[in-house]
């Protein structure tokens, strides 16, 4: 009985379903299977049979660690969810394995350090957040490593170099 419960998901729906399974319906906030909120893991396979994604659901909402791969086990993204919202560390990688982004969330909003990198490995963004709002030092770079913006965010205001273009003409 326990084995049957584990394989079938105890509530009658399968513990694992492919994304193309008949009877699945995804709305903006919930996933249903045969008209009922789904609890289990949704997965996607490549034509070659490699796992491309696993997404855990509880009562129709993303809940747990969702993972995506480029194929052949090469990781692409990892996101943590609680009750349908990103919560915790979210990471992504470029196809060559270098980091693409690292973000921290709480209840679906940025919280703490947010970092992004270009495909060439150069940093693209580094900023701090509190309750989804910029808070503290923020930096942005161009793909060649040139600093584009460097400012401090406090109480909804920005102080410092925001990245304004410096234009000049020969007709002054």
Image (tube, rainbow, N blue to C red):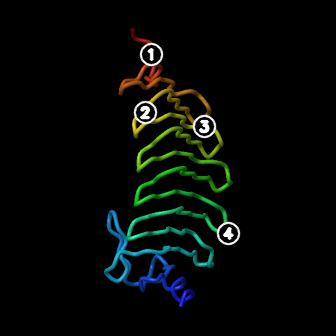
Chain-order first, disc 4 or disc 3: 4
Q: Who's the residue at 45% across and 79% down the image?
A: 20
**What residue did someone put label 3 on?**
123
**What residue did someone put label 4 on?**
72
User: Residue 74: percent from the left, percent from the top?
Assistant: 66, 63
Q: Could you tell me which quadrant the C terminus lies in? A: top left
**Mark 1 or mark 2, which is nearer to you?**
2
Q: Nearer the viewer, residue 166 or 9?
A: 9
**What residue did someone put label 2 on?**
134
**Mark 3 or mark 1, which is nearer to you?**
3
Q: Who's the residue at 63% across and 60% down the image?
A: 75
Label 3: element kind: strand
Q: Residues within 10 Å of mark 2 (few under 14, many from 20)?
A: many
Chain-order first, disc 4 or disc 1: 4
Label 1: element kind: loop
**Distance from Cα at disc 2 to Cα at disc 3:** 18 Å
**Mark 2 or mark 3, which is nearer to you?**
2
Q: Who's the residue at 48% across and 81% down the image?
A: 9
Label 2: element kind: strand
Q: Which mark is residue 168?
A: 1
Is 15 rendered above or below residue 140? below
**Distance from Cα at disc 4 to Cα at disc 3:** 27 Å
Q: Who's the residue at 40% across and 11% down the image?
A: 171
Q: Nearer the viewer, residue 168 or 29?
A: 29
């Amino acid at each position: 009985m326990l084995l049957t419960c584990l394989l079938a998901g105890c509530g009658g729906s399968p513990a694992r379903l492919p994304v193309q399974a008949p009877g699945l319906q995804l709305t903006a906030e919930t996933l249903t299977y045969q008209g009922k909120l789904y609890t289990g893991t949704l997965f996607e396979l490549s034509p070659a049979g490699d796992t491309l994604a696993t997404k855990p659901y509880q009562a129709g909402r993303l809940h747990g660690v969702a993972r995506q791969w480029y194929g052949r086990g090469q990781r692409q993204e990892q996101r943590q969810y609680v009750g349908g919202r990103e919560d915790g560390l979210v990471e992504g990688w470029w196809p060559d394995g270098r980091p693409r982004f690292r973000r921290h969330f709480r209840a679906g909003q940025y919280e703490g350090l947010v970092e992004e990198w270009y495909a060439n490995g150069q940093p693209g963004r580094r900023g701090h957040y509190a309750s989804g709002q910029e808070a503290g030092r923020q930096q942005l770079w161009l793909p060649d490593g040139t600093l584009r913006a460097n400012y401090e965010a406090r109480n909804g205001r920005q102080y410092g170099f925001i990245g304004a273009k410096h234009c000049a003409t020969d007709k002054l």
